Amino acid sequence: MSTRHDLDLNAFEAILKAEKTKIEKNIALIKVELSSIGMDGELDEILDSAEIEIENSTDHMLLEKLESELDEINAALNRIALGTYGICEKTNQPIPIERLKANPTARTMVGE
């Protein structure tokens, strides 16, 4: 299947780029926070090492999740550039517009 003409690709591209910007800012903030954990003068006397470890672990998990989301957004933007956006990677059929509106990074139809 070729490029979908029933989609407003510019609108989906704008949505994806706005989300990309937001995620990149959040990634930068988490990286700053992670780099400051454990620095001299940064630790509150109330926090013990277990609490710091939990916070550090949570930040790392969130960072991984955000980086994965960023990868999916970049892949979707690449599909727009290639003209394959909105085409199911498994069936080569059009992904329903409602699904793309709910999940602009969708690669497949529901259940695929």
Image (cartoon, rainbow, N blue to C red):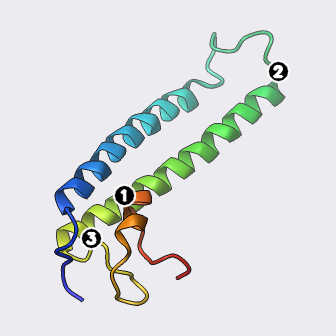
Check the picture and name the quadrant holding the N terminus. bottom left
Residue 74: which quarter of the image?
Answer: bottom left
- Residue type, label 1: Ile
Label 2 belongs to which residue?
48
Other residues around mark 1 within 10 Å, as few (<14) / some (14–19) / many (≥20): many
Q: Secondary structure at mark 1?
A: helix
Q: Secondary structure at mark 2?
A: loop
- CB-based contact (under 8 Å), mark 2 and mark 1: no
As drawn, the label of residue 107 is none
Label 3 belongs to which residue?
79
Q: Position of residue 32 (x, y in %)?
A: 49, 28
Residue 85: which quarter of the image?
Answer: bottom left
As drawn, the label of residue 73 is 1
Q: Is residue 47 left or right of residue 94?
A: right
- CB-based contact (under 8 Å), mark 3 and mark 2: no
- Residue type, label 2: Asp
Which badge, 3 or 2, is on the more N-terminal residue?
2
Which badge, 2 or 1, is on the more N-terminal residue?
2
Cα gap from disc 2 to disc 1, whole angstroms: 38 Å
Q: Position of residue 99 (x, y in %)?
A: 43, 66
Residue 52: which quarter of the image?
Answer: top right
- Residue 86 in the image: above or below residue 22: below
Q: Residue at x 56, y 24 (%)?
A: 36
Q: Is residue 89 left or right of residue 81?
A: right
